[in-house]
Structure formats: structure tokens, C-alpha cells
Amino acid sequence: MKHWLPALFAVFYALTAAAQQPDSTYRFTRQDTLRGGLRPERTSYDVTFYDLNLSVNPATRTIDGSNTIRYRVKEPFRRMQIDLFDNMQIAAITQNGQKLTFKRDGNAVFVDMKEAQPVGQLREVKVTYSGSPQVAKNPPWDGGFLWRQDPSGKSWVTVTCQGTGASLWWPCKDHLSDEPDSMRITCRVPNGLTCVSNGTLQSKRPARTAGQTEFIWYVRYPINIYNVTLNIANYAYFKDEYRSLDRQTLALNYYVLPQNLEKANVHFEQVKAMLDCYEKYFGKFPFWRDGYKLVETPYWGMEHQTAIAYGNNYRNTPFGFDFIIIHESGHEYFGNSLSAGDSGEMWIHEAFATYAEALYMECTHSIPKAIEYLNMQRKLIKNQHPMLGPLGVNYQHRDTDIYYKGSWMLHTLRHAVDNDNLWFKALKALATEKKLSIVNTDEVIDFLELKTQVDLQSIADQYLKYTGIPVLEYKVLAKNDKQWEIRHRWVADTKGFNLPVKVRFGFGEWQTIYPKTEWSATNVKFSSGWLNFNTDYGLFTIRQVRLE
């Protein structure tokens, strides 16, 4: 039982690695460029609203419907790019009731407008489509629909698309840089099933087609397109509420399989303690009006905005919490609210959400317990690929370092600041001041520097842009029985790497040294015992070198 959590993480890494193509064989294709790049056919318009309206037929494993894309014209254009996988059939694309001509280039669809699109105007195009969407072989690590049955034999349909792309099942501008301000999702399913999507449920009613029920969900906030989801099953529903520090009430909504209703009532109680901790560190839940949801799924989990996929079988780690609930809910703040604008910068989503797990341990237990948890994460760092990937090419990360190394990078930055009051104020300001916005790597690091007034760029660059872990080289020179001299330097890829480190002899008091990339020296109080470096506070290795 003691080794259960590392084993769980090891499985997570193995499955992730299996789902991704090795770096040495990966080549960016034209489709990667069309999906990941920004050209005038995409940048000339800004999506303000999606109206996704579809029917889901589990018996035939098909979907059909439409998506109306409302957009504001940023630059004059006569041609626009919409994305939809080429195995999905487009019946028509219309504007103002008139059919538009379009041409496919793989999964990209180029639409020719009949008239000029004047700057500043709001326009709409409607895409009517149908097909059998790609099936997910290993969700959530690859994208597609999952057509399953629950233990009673009723249909259980879900979809994941992070990385693979939302356009595998609905037409959209499939790029992280553009989120709609709001969205409506209308879903029709066979009678007896419930369709759970993002946002709040506006209505449930008989559909026009006999034998179907229609569910209409409304998202009041910007939403990442890969966060848009459908969960269809014979769900049992129960609700709860969370009160914030200012006594406002947040709706907690839970959709689970009927046989799990009793255990879910008990297990999901940890959500309120988690929200307490996250409010302390990151501010109030960012999608307050849409509420918080957990939805049971046949796969492990995914951070679908306000409809978090939960499939961890109601298990807690030996640390006493459910890993999926804590991690995926962390994404509501980092990934869903504060979002990266390019797939190469997904460390912003995963590093902060994984670090949130350790902060949850600190909040509910203690700093030593959080360090124990972090050291468990540390064992899974691979140092094989940079955390910051190439931009504009639909880059998919090759390993899980954006999780565990990312978590340790943030933990290291905290101790580089060496002032918890400053660090946590900066972290909370990042989550609240950048709420509901799209950011990039430089913006995040610059913001933390501004709020802490500490130079963090060279430290962050080492972990983000290079695979190697910095090495602290040192020599010790005995001066007298009260002071010893430590000579030290960093061996790192970034010029000016300057991470402070705490040292002590034996069980004496901790003292801080300030190594640079050139040799320098610090006098340290001597007491009996070996020289110790506090590696619990930073991601680095140590190498003693001989005195010259």
C-alpha cells in the first residue's frame, strides 16, 4: 500500500508515453502546420460565440447537427479557415441563408465568402455536418468518442479531445489562441439517457424527433475548445453547495452511475475542502455562475470546464485524497481560466495543476507532507525533452515532464523568492488578475517576477528550455573551528543561473549561499557533521570537486 501512489503515477507515465510518438521519429506535417499555425484565414476573425446543436446516436455511433460560429471581423477577409476532421461530412456552410463554397485540405476547411467582411462587424456562418467521429483507443491520452455500456447494459458515451483537437467531432477554429466569450451546447440523445455538458442546464425537454430527449447547456464564460464535452449515460444526479469566504454559494453538481450514488455522496465531500484550499491560493472558483460539476466517465479523468470527467473509481491515495479530483479541479484555475495560447506551452496548464496537488497537501496537512508528496513526483521526472515546445505547429509533448518537472520548477521558484508571503501573493494575483485570459510563457514568468521583485527568468529558462538539471559544483576549505569556506558555482545551460541554496553542517542552522555560474565563495558557520544541501527546496543535483 505504501507504494501505491508511485505505481499509479508510473502507470500514468507509461500510458501517456504509449499514446505519443517518440521525438526521434516525429516529423511535423502540413496538417500540423494547418492546425497549429496562425494565418490570415484564422487571425482575421475572432470567435465570440459557438452554438453547437447535435444529435448523438449510440446505436449507429454517429452524430449529426450543426455549429453556428459567431465572430467579429478583425481584418477584412474573403476567405476563412474552419477545422473539422476529414472523416466528418459537411452538408453545407451558409451565411445569411446563402450557401458558401468551401475546399478541404485534410482537416482544414477553407470557406470562400460571398461578400466582404467589414472590420468590427459581427457575422455568423453555420456549418451543418454529420459522421462517425474518431474512436478513442486510450482515453484521455488520445482523442475521440468512447462508445461504452454501463454495468446495466445502457449506453455510456463520452468524448475527449485534448491534443487531438475539438475538430475531431465539431467544426470550430481549432486553436488555443481563440476562445468564444460564451457558448450553447444542445444535445439530443435517446430517451432514458442524460446528456451532461459544460456550463448550466437551461432546459430538458422532448426532442422533435420521437424517442429523443433534448438537453440545452449554456456556458457563460470563455472556454477552451478542447474543454467542450458531452457525457451521455443513465446518470443519477445529486447536488451540494460550497460557501466561499465572502459567504457566496457555489453550486456543486454531481452526475454518477446509479450504483455508485451512495459512495459518491461520501467520496465527493472532499471537494469542499479542496475548494477552500484553492480559494486560499488562487482566489474564488473562476466559473462561479456556471457552477462546479463532476461527471462519472469510463476513463480516468479530464479537466473539461465545469464538467470535470471523473473515472478514478472512488479511490483515495495513501495521502488521503482522490488524485483525479484534486488535479483536474486545479485546471479550472490553470488551463481553463488562465489558458495557454499554443500547444507548445501546455506546461502552463499541467505544471500549475500538478503543483496544486502539493499545495493541497500543504493546506490540509503540513509542509513536510507536501515535500514528501513532491519527492514522489520528483522520481518521475525524465529530463528527455524541454517543457517548452515549438510554437505554431500543433506540438504534442512527448512525456510527462510538463507535469512533474513543471511542479518542481514552481516549487523551486518559490524557494528562489525565499519569502512565502510574497510568493503566494504573486501566485494568487496570477490566477485572479489573469483570470479568463490567454497567456504565454514570458507573460507568466514576467508577472511572477514583477510581483515578487525577484529575478526568476534565468531559473525558469533552465527548466523550460533545456533538458538538463542544473548541477551545483562545490569545494570545501576548512578555515578554523568556527567557519569553513564553501566555493561554489552552477553548471547550467542558461547564462546567469542564480538559484540560492540552503546549506548547513550536521544539524546546525540553515544558511543561504548564492552560487552563480562563475566560481565564488561563502563563509559558513561550522558545526560537527557532514555538509548538507537542502535539495527539498530545489530541483538540482550536487557534485563535489577536488580542491586545486
Image: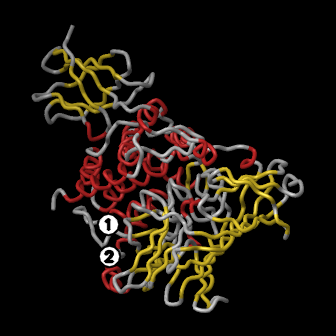
Q: Which mark is residue 322?
A: 1
Residue at mark 2 to residue at mark 1: CA–CA distance: 9 Å
Q: Dot 1: what SS?
A: loop
- The x, y position of residue 185, in whole percent, is 62, 74
State the residue position of label 2: 267
Q: Is residue 478 above or below residue 200?
A: above
- The x, y position of residue 496, in whole percent, is 44, 23
Q: Is residue 159 left or right of residue 359?
A: right
Which quadrant of the figure has residue 128?
bottom right
Q: Give 468 or 246, whichever is nearer the viewer.
A: 468
Q: Amino acid at mark 2?
A: His
Quick one: label 2 or label 1, which is nearer the N terminus?
2
Q: Is residue 440 left or right of residue 347?
A: right
Q: Dot 2: what SS?
A: helix
Q: Is residue 349 left or right of residue 186?
A: left
Mark 2, Cα crowd under 10 Å, few <14 / some 14-19 / many 20+, is: some
Q: Is residue 95 left or right of residue 131?
A: right
Identify the residue at horizontal 41%, vertical 24% (top origin): 493
Q: Amino acid at mark 1?
A: Asp
Identify the residue at horizontal 67%, vertical 50% (top origin): 105
Please state, as top left, top right, bottom left or bottom right, where the C terminus lies in the image. Answer: top left
- The x, y position of residue 501, in whole percent, is 31, 31
- The x, y position of residue 197, in whole percent, is 54, 74
Q: Give 147 or 302, whichever is nearer the viewer.
A: 147
Q: Furthest-top residue in view? A: 548
Which quadrant of the figure has residue 102?
bottom right
Q: Are marks 2 and 1 in contact (CB under 8 Å)?
A: yes
Q: Which mark is residue 299?
A: none
